[in-house]
Image (tube, rainbow, N blue to C red):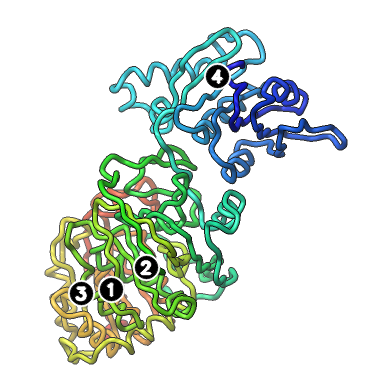
Amino acid sequence: MAALDAPGAVLVVSDDLASVREIAARLHRATVHALVATHPAGDPIPQNVTLHLAATPSERVRVVAELPRFDAALDMLVDQADKVAALRSLAYFVKVDGTYLVREPGERHAGSNVTALLDGLTALAASVEMRRSAPVPDAELAQAVVVASSSSAVASLTRRRHFYFKLRDAEADRVLTQRYGAEWGDVLHTVLPREFAAQGSVTAHGTGPALGSNQTIDVPALHLRSYRWPRASVRQLLTYGGDYVLPDAFRHPLQPTLSHPQLAGVSRDFGRLLRRAQPTSRRKLRGAYYYIDCTYPTHFGHITTEVLARLWGWELARREHPGIRPLLTVRTEGAGMPSYQGQILAALGMDPATAEVVGPHEAVDVETLLSVTPAFENPFYVAPEMAELWTRLSAGLPDAAPPTDNERIFISRRTSGKRDCIETPEVERYFAAAGFSVIYPEEHGYAEQRAMFSRARIVAGFGGSGMFNMMFAPSARIIIISGDAYTAANEFLFAAANGNELHYFWGTSTIRPPKPGAYLHEAFQSDFHFDVHAFAPELAPLLA
């Protein structure tokens, strides 16, 4: 313990204050933060100790997430399983080259949970092959801590690598304010959480995911935040203070599990920046910017859902900062935003020519960055205000002649190697014979697509981003044909806000999920069979 008796910040995790008091006396030159389960009234707290009540692993993480990183941590817990959970969650809060000490309640023995974990980490650290086959949390922890020494009573581990705490949207304001005070920024506007009844109707034909079975949409609180000096880099990676990944970096910022393509998924709470994501240059941006980044910055479907879902706060942001400019990243050096994205921005009052583009190898520190909780998150929720945003977008796009005057259109897909309907030619012939125009939307300009969808009375097509312009057709009947492993709910969310009559027709995906309605990436992306003639009795009444 003598090695800890130096100026610095030390975390002590214990079952009671008595052992903390003993340690604090020995670490009299250190600032001690202590996590204990209880604190009897009147029990004095040592002068160099800040006491935090936290009895479970999740409570400890909640508390420690708000604190600066520690020079050292000391585990004084008694229960073996609790000690293992503490090591797995708290070791990442120690600074690089800091120390994590584990004190056993008695002689270490081969059968103890902690001994088994430490021995396992030592073996994994020494073997690349073992790490490849080990569970990810174990492999990452083995490279995050080095078991430097071990005695009969104490194990000393040294922290390695740099890790980021992944902030969820609901906890971001509390954590940042506790850590940085007002320095991090502010919440400029909040739309309170609410629920609303889906405006459309959903009918399933065949057996598939129960999309739309819950007709009550729970919309979380939506925030417009202003960050001071966050760091932006490619593929929607947004960090703060060198310790946190901001919720705005995640496609699903409110979910229990946060993942990002630029981060190794170390644990539920921590991520590690992958080598490919390491920037080769840095710069600073003065002024105010509005965050419109996307993990998939050239993908039509992601831009027309995820980027659009961020634009509800633009007018509020512009009132706060009249000269504010949009900010986005690109994955290819010298690239810009897709042309249709520029049209979307212009239609909603942004000048795409003023957009600040962050290159694929840059890290850019932004003086003031305004960003929002998305108002549309597949497959979880849509805010009803999105319907008004889609209406404004439609009205703001330039006039264009539609590729067809037909009020009945079938949106088809070229063969792409994912989610292809194997019987596409047969399906197209069926709808053409029923009087539909068969359309490949990517062959037409964005304004032309808007014009076509906005006048459509019936829109049928294969599920996916080609159908997303149904946002411009709030009065249309929508018919979706897809494989039964297609769990995306985008079309349902559009209909829920706009009020469409929606029909799902389920084919058979060639790769099966583990159980009906479950998500499996390979199954989700797989091709599917669809016997259009078998469904003809159900389709025919819907096509007139």
Report which quarter residue 493 is drawn in: bottom left
**Place of residue 123 in the rendered image (x, y in percent of width and height, measured from the top left):** 39, 16
Q: Are the residues tagged 2 and 1 within 8 Å (C-beta)? A: yes
Whole-angstrom CA distance, mark 3 to mark 1, is: 19 Å
In the displayed structure image, the side of residue 69 where residue 309 appears, left or right: left
**Place of residue 190 in the rendered image (x, y in percent of width and height, measured from the top left):** 57, 70
Frontmost of labels 3 and 4 is 3
Q: Residue at x 60, y 40 (%)?
A: 64
Q: From this viewpoint, is residue 526 visible?
A: yes
Q: From this viewpoint, is residue 541 visible?
A: no
Report which quarter residue 124 is drawn in: top left
Q: Which mark is residue 339?
A: 3
Q: Which residue is mark 4?
A: 114
Residues 456 and 335: in front is 335
Q: Are the residues tagged 3 and 1 within 8 Å (C-beta)? A: no
Q: Amino acid at mark 3?
A: Ser
Label 2 vs 4, first from the N-terminus: 4
Q: Residues within 10 Å of mark 3 (few under 14, many from 20)?
A: few
Eyeballing the image, is 275 above or below 491? Answer: above
Q: Which residue is mark 2?
A: 490
Frontmost of labels 3 and 2 is 3
